[in-house]
């Protein structure tokens, strides 16, 4: 993925259509995303693109059990990441290197109704953490951008005006060159209260876990990590409960027989990529990075191998990256874990985890699944399936690196 030298850019999208599907998301956002990617892929630098998506349907619900918001939130994240991957494939945009023109897109959800007003004395809340953030916190903490893409149309321009107005309370002007990109077609109902589904779960979670190789971090990984973060119940000023986001990362020894293993990143590199991504969607503070976080490394002894903990001081969140040597990792060594996020491919592993926990007399973890990223409906039939797959597959990314290396040696 792009290195720390990648310049940050921002895309502010208007609210989503009421009915979320690959077709409706493509109609609403494909023109804006296409214009943004087209502009960034021609730059002489790499870009870390933060995509901010307002979600009126979650407004004023953030203190409710996050499990009740999970299905809707991850569904729209999956649809948007699919659309980004599909557009990047069609345009030939690089999403897996540090080369000029490469694009590392990350999606942040915004608690925003469109009709909100913010008094001049609006208080910044240091306990707020992503991946769902309110507009003032975002505007007060993210100051500088290389490019800001604002979507044409009433809703898009209203959001940009609100963001600009709030940002100017802490600085003289918004830092970043603003480009207006075309909008799509979106039907949004105003009576959002009437279409909200009843809560599906009343459980709250302060220790959640996800596992994987996380090699060459791609859209599928980003969805998994964001979905896991979604489940962490927010802290508040009354009870700043410690929250743990545990990421089991497969150890190097278990991966040496993988295809194109010579192009596999090391455990440390993969851990760095995971933490870098999570900080970009979780940490919102005015403090410098070295004051905002604490990092602790554990080589010996830990139950599953080495571990690196990154604590976000303001929001009481600790990102615990643990080296795993088996399919279970901390899920069967840490009884306090209450939620596990899986993909469709690892669904059976969730049941195996609960079987093992049952053998120990422990409560089962709640299992949450993410949607499969899919190009169907996001394109007009002009994009080959293998192009889309190359954007969301670590194996395909390594294969392309191997092919590039062979060609350069000829």
Image: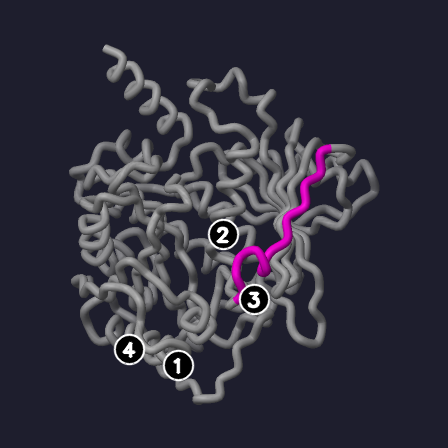
Q: Is residue 410 visible?
A: yes
Mark 1 sits on what residue? 169
Q: Residue 325 shows which numbered tag?
A: none
Query: Circle 4: is it few (<14), some (14-19), or many (20+) Cα within 10 Å?
Result: few
Residue named by callout 2: 226
Label 1 neighbour load within 10 Å: few <14, some 14-19, many 20+: few
Question: Which residue corresponds to mark 4?
Answer: 161
Picture disc at residue 199: 3
Of the numbered discs 3 and 2, the one sitting upstream in the chain is 3
The Cα atoms of the two marked residues, 3 and 2, are separated by 20 Å
Question: In which quarter of the view is residue 178 placed?
Answer: bottom left
Question: Which quadrant of the rendered structure holds the N terminus?
Answer: top left
**Residues tagged 1 and 4 counted as in contact (Cβ below 8 A):** no
Judged by depth in the image, the label closer to the viewer, 1 or 2, is 1
Q: Which label's residue is closer to the chain start, 1 or 4?
A: 4
Choose mark 1 or mark 4, whichever is in front.
1
- Specify start and end residues of the magenta stretch as a single range: 287-299
For marks 1 and 4, give the CA distance. 13 Å
Please identify the quadrant where the C terminus is shown.
top left
Real-space CA distance between mark 1 and mark 2, rounded to the nearest whole angstrom = 29 Å
Choose the circle earlier in sequence order: 4 or 3: 4
**77 w.r.t. 256: above or below:** below
Q: Residue at x 56, y 34 (%)?
A: 268
Q: Earlier in the sequence, mark 1 or mark 3?
A: 1
Residue at the limit of the structure toward the top, as seen here: 410
**Tag nearer the camera, 4 or 3:** 4
Q: Dot 3 lies on which element?
A: loop
Residue 71: percent from left, percent from top? 49, 57
Front-most of residues 97 and 290: 290
Q: Position of residue 76 (x, y in %)?
A: 39, 56
Q: Residues within 10 Å of mark 3 (few under 14, many from 20)?
A: few
């Amino acid at each position: 993925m792009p290195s720390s030298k990648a310049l940050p850019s921002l895309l502010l999208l208007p609210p989503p259509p009421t009915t979320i599907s690959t077709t409706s998301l493509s109609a609403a956002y494909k023109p804006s995303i296409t214009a943004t990617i087209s502009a960034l892929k021609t730059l002489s630098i790499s870009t870390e693109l933060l995509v901010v998506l307002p979600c009126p349907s979650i407004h004023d619900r953030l203190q409710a059990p996050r499990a009740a918001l999970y299905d809707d939130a991850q569904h729209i994240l999956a649809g948007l990441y699919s659309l980004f991957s599909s557009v990047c494939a069609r345009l030939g945009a690089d999403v897996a290197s540090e080369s000029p023109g490469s694009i590392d897109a990350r999606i942040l959800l915004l608690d925003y109704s469109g009709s909100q007003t913010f008094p001049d004395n609006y208080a910044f809340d240091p306990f707020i953490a992503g991946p769902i953030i309110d507009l003032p916190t975002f505007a007060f903490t993210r100051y500088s951008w290389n490019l800001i893409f604002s979507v044409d149309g009433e809703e898009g321009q209203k959001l940009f005006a609100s963001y600009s107005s709030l940002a100017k309370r802490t600085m003289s002007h918004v830092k970043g060159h603003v480009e207006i990109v075309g909008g799509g077609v979106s039907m949004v109902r105003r009576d959002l209260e009437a279409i909200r589904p009843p809560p599906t779960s009343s459980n709250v979670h302060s220790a959640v876990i996800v596992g994987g190789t996380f090699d060459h971090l791609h859209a599928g990984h980003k969805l998994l990590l964001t979905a896991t973060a979604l489940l962490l119940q927010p802290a508040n000023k009354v009870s700043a409960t410690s929250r743990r986001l545990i990421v089991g990362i497969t150890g190097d020894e278990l991966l040496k027989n993988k295809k194109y293993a010579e192009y596999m990143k090391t455990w440390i590199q993969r851990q760095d990529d995971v933490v870098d991504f999570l900080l970009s969607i979780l940490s919102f503070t005015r403090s410098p990075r070295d004051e905002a976080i604490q990092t602790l490394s554990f080589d010996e002894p830990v139950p599953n191998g080495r571990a690196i903990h990154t604590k976000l001081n303001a929001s009481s969140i600790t990102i615990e990256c643990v080296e795993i040597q088996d399919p279970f990792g901390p899920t069967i060594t840490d009884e306090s874990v209450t939620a596990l996020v899986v993909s469709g491919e690892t669904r059976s592993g969730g049941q195996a985890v609960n079987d093992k926990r049952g053998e120990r007399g422990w409560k089962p973890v709640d299992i949450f699944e993410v949607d499969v990223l899919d190009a169907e409906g996001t394109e007009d039939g002009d994009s080959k399936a293998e192009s889309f797959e190359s954007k969301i597959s670590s194996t395909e990314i390594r294969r392309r690196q191997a092919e590039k290396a062979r060609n350069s040696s000829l």
